[in-house]
Image (tube, grey):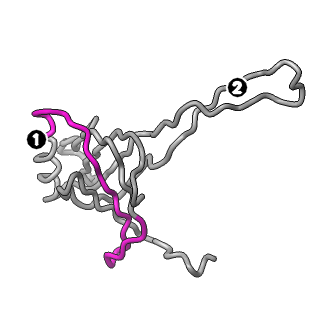
Amino acid sequence: MLEDTATAVGLQYVVTVDGHKLGTFASCEGLGLEVVVESREEGGFNTGVWQLPTRVKYPNVKLTRPLGKETADVMAWLSTVSQGLVATTASIEARTTDGTTVVRWTLQGVVPIRWTGPSLTPDTTKVVTETLELAHHGFGKGA
């Protein structure tokens, strides 16, 4: 029932990788999965086509936030990762503005694939942001 659900308005996303807190992000995109199916037509089965599941694909997760003090935490993590790329475990907690955790996802086999910093131009009036993009191999327990 809807009244039993903790409705989250104004979420923030707290990201931790192997126990290292990377900080709080303003947006999180790409959490999901897709089951890839293969269509097979069978002789004598004239009422349809078999849809056979073959594998599961996970889109990249993009985390964005305004540039701030926590950017140093991401840069420190990326610096250690660049010394030897090893898949890790990450957690993303969706929290309300008062800090209540609404849901937590655990991602397995996480590798950073992109970090994008701000465009530093003197004529812009927009908030400068950073984006961290993570690839992963699926959800773990606690997701």
Q: Earlier in the sequence, mark 2 or mark 1?
A: 2
Residue 115 shown left or right of residue 26 in the figure: left
Check the image and name the residue furthest to the top. 43
Image spot of residue 87 (x, y percent): 26, 39
Which residue is depicted at the point 22% across and 42% down? 117
Taking depth in this image into account, of 63 and 139 the one nearest to the observer is: 139
Residue 88 falls inside the magenta stretch: yes
Q: Which residue is mark 1?
A: 80
Q: Is residue 43 left or right of residue 58?
A: right
Asked whether, in this view, residue 108 is left or right of residue 78, the answer is: right
- Residue extending farthest front: 44
Quarter location, residue 54: top right
Q: Residues within 10 Å of mark 1 (few under 14, many from 20)?
A: few
- Range of magenta residues: 79-103
Q: Residue at x 39, y 60 (%)?
A: 142
Q: Which residue is mark 2?
A: 39
Quadrant where the C terminus lies? bottom left
Residue at the location (67% across, 31% down)?
52
Secondary element under disc 1, as helix, strand or loop, is helix
